[in-house]
């Protein structure tokens, strides 16, 4: 009996030491299984809901990047532009073109309203839809360089950035007969070495100061509100004329006539970026 009690005591002791770890691991395993990524529809970058450390790090990185872009604007005011002169004029700009789902409809609206805009072209899309790029230029709009396949420039080396710009430049030149002087970096993202190269090579890098946020698939009223609440003298307005799989820019297209008419009613003139910034459209 004494020997049995001794063995039972050892078993209970081992069980008490081992069970908490088993329970902990089971809870951890269940917790990990329940975590699902939250997908950002524009950037397609998974953000885990339970990873607060990564979220804080990402927020700090974005804040640091915003500060850096502000510093670059102050350091290179002639090369890195975010708004025009404080005059009664605004510039409509459309990124991620050409896209047969949306770009022709935007061009139709602009033609009906007799307004010229600036379109930032992705090289790979221009290869697929050269006639659409030709139409943009033929109807009097300005074309700028928006990279070959829309990377985040701060994540690529200088040589890859240069290749993105040069390759797209050659494609555009082959279609419309000139090399654009304007660059808009995807996501508005650029580093100082990349900006220095752009300056040395004769480019002007143009971001924006009014964001429609239309890439979120907003409806007409939301797109209009985002623009009308912010637009003012010398505003450079960001909208999109193309998107990824599943993108919905119907709100942009529906809001565009109202935006143009309301801004005209307030006394604003619509100009292209070369007109606003008094620069050439080509290098």
Image (cartoon, rainbow, N blue to C red):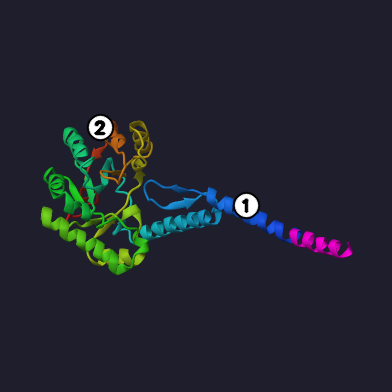
Report how far apart the C-alphas of labels 2 and 1 lie in the structure: 56 Å
x then y, percent, for residue 212:
35, 41
Instruction: Kindly indicate the quadrant of the structure image that contains residue 224.
Output: top left
Circle 2: element type: helix
Residue 196 numbered tag: none
Residue highlighted by disc 2: 257
Please report whichever mark, 2 or 1, sits nearer to the chain's N-terminal start: 1
Q: Secondary structure at mark 1?
A: helix
Instruction: Name the residue rendered at 27%, 56% in the picture.
Output: 149
Q: Is residue 39 in view? A: yes
Q: Which residue is mark 1?
A: 27
Q: Is residue 191 above or below residue 93?
A: below
For this view, does 65 lie left or right of residue 240?
right
Q: Verify CB contact (< 8 Å) between mark 2 and mark 1.
A: no
- Residue 20 in percent (x, y) is at 70, 56
Q: Which residues are magenta?
A: 1-15
Write the residue at 22% across / 47% down.
118
């Amino acid at each position: 009996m004494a020997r049995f009690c001794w063995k039972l005591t050892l078993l209970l002791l081992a069980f008490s030491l081992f069970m908490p770890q088993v329970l902990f691991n089971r809870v951890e395993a269940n917790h990990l299984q329940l975590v699902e990524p939250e997908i950002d529809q524009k950037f397609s970058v998974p953000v885990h809901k339970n990873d607060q450390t990564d979220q804080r790090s990402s927020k700090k990185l974005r804040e640091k990047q915003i500060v850096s872009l502000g510093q670059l604007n102050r350091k290179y005011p002639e090369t890195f532009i975010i708004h025009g002169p404080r005059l009664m004029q605004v510039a409509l700009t459309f990124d991620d073109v050409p896209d047969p789902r949306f770009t022709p409809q935007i061009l139709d609206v602009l033609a009906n309203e007799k307004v010229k805009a600036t379109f930032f072209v992705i090289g790979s899309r221009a290869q697929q839809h050269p006639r659409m790029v030709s139409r943009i230029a033929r109807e009097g709009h300005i074309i700028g360089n928006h990279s070959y396949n829309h990377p985040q420039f701060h994540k690529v080396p200088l040589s890859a950035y240069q290749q993105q710009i040069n390759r797209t430049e050659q494609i555009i030149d082959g279609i419309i007969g000139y090399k654009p002087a304007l660059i808009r970096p995807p996501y508005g993202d650029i580093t100082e070495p990349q900006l220095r190269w752009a300056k040395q090579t004769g480019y002007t890098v143009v971001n924006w100061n009014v964001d429609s946020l239309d890439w979120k698939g907003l409806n007409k009223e939301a797109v209009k509100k985002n623009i009308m609440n912010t637009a003012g003298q010398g505003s450079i307005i960001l909208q999109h004329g193309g998107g990824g799989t599943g993108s919905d820019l119907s709100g942009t297209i529906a809001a565009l006539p109202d935006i143009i008419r309301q801004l005209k009613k307030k006394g604003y003139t619509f100009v292209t970026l070369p007109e606003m910034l008094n620069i050439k459209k080509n290098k």
